[in-house]
Amino acid sequence: MNMSKNNSKSKFKQKQNKVELLLLILYVIGFYIFCIHRSLRLSRDHFSKLRGLRVGWLFSPARLNDASDDQWRNFRTNLPILSLVFGIFTLLANIFRKLFRLRARGMSFLWFFLSLIYLSYLHGACILFIFLIASSNFLLVKIFARAKYFTFLLWIFNLGFLFCNRIYQGYSFSIFGEYWEYLDNFRGTFRWHICFNLVVLRMISFGYDYHWAHQESRFDQEKHIQRCHVCKSGKNCYQILQERNAHMNDYTFTTYLSYLVYAPLYIAGPIISFNSFASQLDVPQNHYSIKEVIWYGLRWVFGLCLMELMTHLFYFNAFATSASWKMLSPMDIFIVGYGVINFMWLKFFLIWRFFRFCSLIAGIEAPENMPKCINNCHDLESFWKSWHASFNKWIVRYMYIPLGGSQRKLINIWVIFTFVAVWHDLEWKLLSWAWLTCLFFVPELLVKSATNAFQAKGALDGFIFRELRAAGGTITITCLMVANLVGYVIGPSGFSWLISQFLSKEGLNVFGFMLLTFYVGTKLMFHVSDAKQSMQ
């Protein structure tokens, strides 16, 4: 009797879930139809007031393309030459590896030579600054690695140069005397101190990995292999490559330099630890088969086509950079803001995956930076784990755990996000973004700790708990959108203006619509998550 009653309840719940899912999908379809229609109209009506639009190649010669974002424009313009250069580099690396059976030492020499050619074009004579600072860091690590105060020295050294590089704009050769002044005419095509931010992360990674190589490893390799489906299949996942100490013979100056300036990942990453880089120089990655790497590249081409379509039809970023959206209605501000966030995600998705693809072809796996779509994140923690995921892994390994991990989580996030902001650039709007994110993060962490202790005793408790999670996700997405717009688009001065727009009579209605949309999106994410769990 009880069994049949439970079965009927289960069937009713499944039917209820299906009805809810259908309604959610219908709402989402309606929302995107509305957004696309309104965005097309906005772009058509305001294109003459926008900066950064160029003649496009899709649809008709008269159709303009949004090239207002400097990063995307530079990447898209240089994509053919980048593809050619990395194609030649990876081809040479693979041929030499097979012909001469090169291992770690030989591959480090080869990649250092190839990367040196690449850097000479990018930075010209400024590579002297890079190698001078890098060599100083290498000596510091080798001399003080076993000292108790080593990590303090490592951070002071690297943070000092991170700040000085920005303050002095990459320095000038003239400061060393008139004899060196002529080198300022050969500074290359790309500012070296911008790329050096990533080099700083690699220098810290080398320092920590060498420091920990002298200590007993806390990584339980056997336990990891039992739980990891990749390692069970006889392959090596990225985590095991990172956590397993490299051989002491791998911590050489040549391997260190080739790691710092490894061409496929030099400009934008993804960020890879020294341990994993050195081990893959010795033995190429076996996680991805040739077929999987080709499929990865084809998916990237599809993403590029999507971006071309987006920038030809919708001028979201041009609205943001031209400040023209301040003349729009609250509804249009919401649509443009939502569009800017999606544009930013797709831009970084394409840039990071291009360089990761080039690295995979060369036999070196780096972490995936965008494993999750931006429209499938309903809490800050999962968002940051999937946005710049390789940076997140770096932070967890070299900052979060050394600072005390989860035991000091509420304090750690302030230190970490402040570092992330100044690492990107010395700007108040980035610090505002960091501290706003922390303010939004603290309540989420407190709520999560409370919900982890909560146990649903019945169907009603389960329903209430799910609705509260959906409400929390709605608020989080709103806060995340505001923080990113303040940090990367409108700046701190625009924050009060943005609030005032949505506190007006018309703005309050739009704000209600926005919350409803994010609530529906969060509920849909729950269904996607449930479907994935049932498939496992």
Image: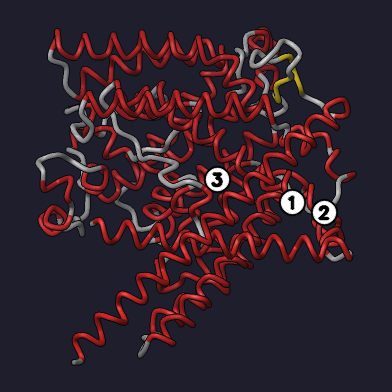
Near mark 1 (Cα within 10 A), the count class, few <14, some 14-19 or many ≥20, is: many
Write the residue at 58% across / 65% down: 519
Marks 3 and 2, Cα distance to the nearest angstrom? 41 Å
User: In the image, is residue 130 above or below residue 29?
Assistant: above
**Residue 269 is drawn in which quadrant?**
top left
Between residue 171 and residue 260, name the one nearer to us.
260
CB atoms at circles 3 and 2 under 8 Å apart?
no
Tag 2 secondary structure = helix
Can you identify the residue that label 3 sits on?
Answer: 159
> If you read the primary sequence from the N terminus, does the residue marked by circle 3 or circle 1 appear first?
3
Q: Quadrant of residue 5?
A: bottom left
Residue shown at 41% from the left, 38% from the top: 271
User: Which amino acid does the dot numbered 3 rest on?
Assistant: Leu
- Of the two numbered discs 3 and 2 in the rendering, the one whose residue sits closer to the viewer: 2
Q: Disc 3 vs disc 1: which is toward the camera?
A: 1
Left or right for 492, reference 127 = right
**Which amino acid type is shown beneath numbered disc 2?**
Pro
**Disc 2 designates what residue?**
330
Q: Residue 272: tell me if it is visible.
A: yes
Looking at the rendered structure, the kind of residue marked 1 is Phe
Task: Give the distance between the C-alpha atoms of the residues marked 1 and 2, in whole angstroms.
Answer: 6 Å
Badge 3 crowding class, 10 Å Cα cut-off, few under 14, some 14 to 19, many 20 or more, is some
* x then y, percent, for residue 392: 44, 50
- Dot 1 falls on a residue whose secondary structure is helix
Which of these two is toward me, 405 or 59? 59
Q: In this figure, which residue is indicated by the disc labeled 1?
A: 334
